[in-house]
Image: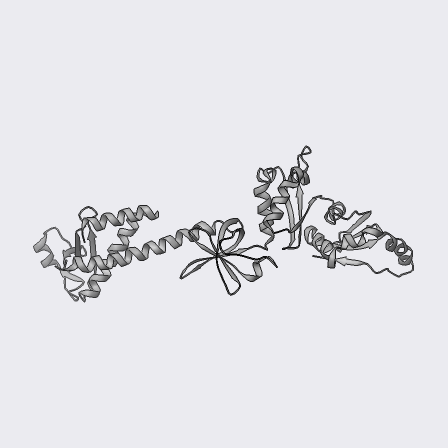
Amino acid sequence: MNADFVQAIFELGKEKGISPELLYQAVEEALITAYKKNFGSSQNVRVDLNKQTGEIHVYARKNIVEHVNDALQELSIEEARKLNPNYELDDIIELEVTPKNFGRIAAQNAKQVVVQRIREAERGMVFEKFSSRENDIVNGVVQRLENRNVYIDLGRAEAILMPNEQIPGEVYQLHDRIKTYIVEVKKTNKGPQIMVSRTHPGLLKRLFELEVPEIHDGLVEIKSVAREAGMRSKIAVYTKDENIDPVGACVGQKGMRVQTIVNELRGEKIDIVKYSSNPEQYVANALSPAKVILAEADDNEKICRVVVPDYQLSLAIGKEGQNARLAAKLTGWKIDIKSESQAQPAVSLASNGNSEESDEYED
């Protein structure tokens, strides 16, 4: 091993962002293993690598004892004092045992270890980088499609978009640039496995945080998100500042802000509603775009009974119950919806012990 090889280790460590000291330490450990393997020695040895010249010295480390039982591990006090009269019992003496042709063997082993350690360190850095970004958005490029899985190039790593995390009906083409949400980062033998999603409610939340400065700055708060990916979503927003319209801030001038997010989600409809600590008002807002005439909340059953105009009953319920179902997910309340004409006879029937059928939805 020569000085150029040692300098190469130093430069490589700096380039890869790995401490050169860690690489030197790894090389020394590898040389100890190489020595024991190639020279059949079970001695306790230490390898010293000169970081300027590249010279290698191997030292056998022995305990100084009165009576030697294992010559590979021990040296008598008499022999030790022949080398240095200052040695005492239980001291450790180091004797150089460097083989003549050890440099060639050392270089081969050092190269393998350095490459392996750099690979392990790079995997570790990638894992740290992306595990700290769980529950965040990343930009990537579609790299390949295999067995309905979409593999996305994130630069120094690859993410997997599983079929159940893909927006229904969304088509992915090679080299498409897409935003995804990091759900989980796992450690594997082949490096970090990054699982991403296009359907997670967190994706919608983070898109609004990135697109709306008032949310980013903490002036407007996202209270809740309910999403049926690719179809429709609802998001509840709130502010303490009376001078700010939280819904208007999210919609943006001429709807530009929300339209940017709709485009990113390939046309997914998004309802932005105002959060209220009053459950009746909150549920009424959540059923938007339908107008609510009356809302009554039952705290014990966690159910809110709602009356809407006859002509808006289907709008309040939505296609296949979607609007009411999302409102229930958003608010965390069961929602019992009746039309105005259904609600009127229900009062008189209830007094006779009867009840009218209604549409009930829950999270």
Scheme of colours in the image = one colour
Q: Would you say 155 lies left or right of 326 here? A: left
Residue at 32% across, 46% down: 15
The foreground one among 255 and 296 is 255
Residue at 82% across, 58% down: 358
Q: Residue furthest left?
A: 82
Which part of the image, by quadrant, shows the C terminus? bottom right
Q: Position of residue 134 (x, y in %)?
A: 51, 51
Which part of the image, by quadrant, shows the N terminus? bottom left
Question: Which of the 4 quarters of the picture holds residue 197?
Answer: bottom right
Looking at the rendered structure, the number of numbered marks drawn on it comes to 0
Question: Which of the 4 quarters of the picture holds residue 108?
Answer: bottom left
Q: Position of residue 127 (x, y in %)?
A: 43, 53
Q: Would you say 255 lies left or right of 206 here? A: right
On the question of residue 146 being in view, the answer is yes
* 281 to 90, vertically: above or below: above
Q: Position of residue 258 (x, y in %)?
A: 64, 44
Q: Position of residue 311 (x, y in %)?
A: 83, 51
Q: Would you say 329 lies left or right of 65 here? A: right
Residue at 61% across, 48% down: 263
